[in-house]
Amino acid sequence: MKKCSLLLAGVALFAPLAGRAQTVDEIVAKSLAARGGVARIKAVQTQLLMGHIALGPDTEGMLQVEMKRPGKIREEVTLNGVTRIRTSDGSTGWLVVGTGEPRPLSADELKSLADSADIDGPLLDYKAKGNRIELLGKEQVEGKDTYKLLVTESNGSVRYDYIDCVSYLGVKWEGKIQANSQELEAESFFHDYRPVDGLMYAFAIDSDTLGTQRKQKLVFDKIEVNPVLDDARFGKPSAQPAAAKPAQ
């Protein structure tokens, strides 16, 4: 009986540890480790993502995104034969559509593009960046238990990140976007994670804008880490030449 009592006492001693709720810092640390680790993430200086984009069954095209520290990004989307290019060198931004003349991005457009250019994401070094993170509990997303994190960035932006309780990879994002001078609620779901140079990337992202019919699906065919990207790629883009007309 004495041995049994000691055994039960030992189980009781460790039970609180097994069921202890995780802190924000523990969840963030495990999420960064799941992505590949802080050192590997910080070693990424450039990224190239190529694939397909669909805005509906009749609107599909090609997508290419180039990113370079600090805050440089170039997006090229070709739909129905028309290419739309957005660029930012980290301080200014430009948009050109087809053969039109490039125009500067508005402050809201530039902020949206800057958010997309963040290679690290808001969780990495979040305290040093002035971000705040709160754990709001657990919530099911597409049948998975997730930790729901409220992230308040230093610029006042608020977003919600959902971290898989098993894999610790991000499965969902919620936040606000600017569209046609309107602030709208949006969400994205991350699927098909694959390793690229020791880092985990979602090769499929499904997004929708709440309260509208806008939906978007990205499927990447190729992701490269640290390709050589010229700084000129992120400056003011040139108007694209008109397509040659077929001979009569």
Image: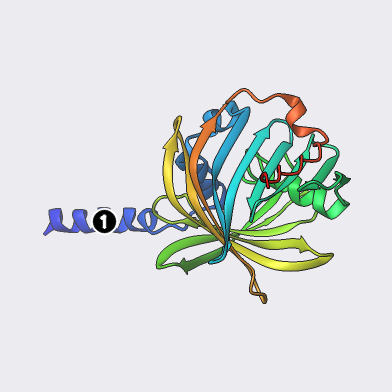
Amino acid identity at mark 1: Val
Disc 1 designates what residue? 11
Tell me if residue 245 comes above or below residue 188 in the rendering.
Answer: above
**Residue 189 % position (x, y):** 52, 60
**Residue 20 % position (x, y):** 43, 57
Work out whether residue 149 can be spotted. yes
Q: Residues within 10 Å of mark 1 (few under 14, many from 20)?
A: few
Q: How is the image coloured?
A: rainbow
Res. 49 image quadrant: top right
What residue is rendered at 88% in x and 46% in y? 103
User: Would residue 151 appear left or right of 138 to someone viewing this image?
Assistant: right
List the single residue furthest toward the left.
1
Res. 53 image quadrant: bottom right
> Where the N terminus falls, by quadrant?
bottom left
Work out whether residue 124 can be spotted. no
Q: Secondary structure at mark 1?
A: helix
List the single residue furthest toward the front.
248
Closest to the observer: 175 or 29? 175
**Residue 183 % position (x, y):** 78, 66
User: Would residue 49 appear left or right of 197 to someone viewing this image?
Assistant: right
What residue is rendered at 38% in x and 59% in y? 19
What residue is rendered at 19% in x and 54% in y? 7
Closest to the observer: 7 or 144? 144
How many numbered tags mark residues here? 1
What residue is rendered at 66% in x and 25% in y? 229
**Residue 172 % position (x, y):** 54, 59
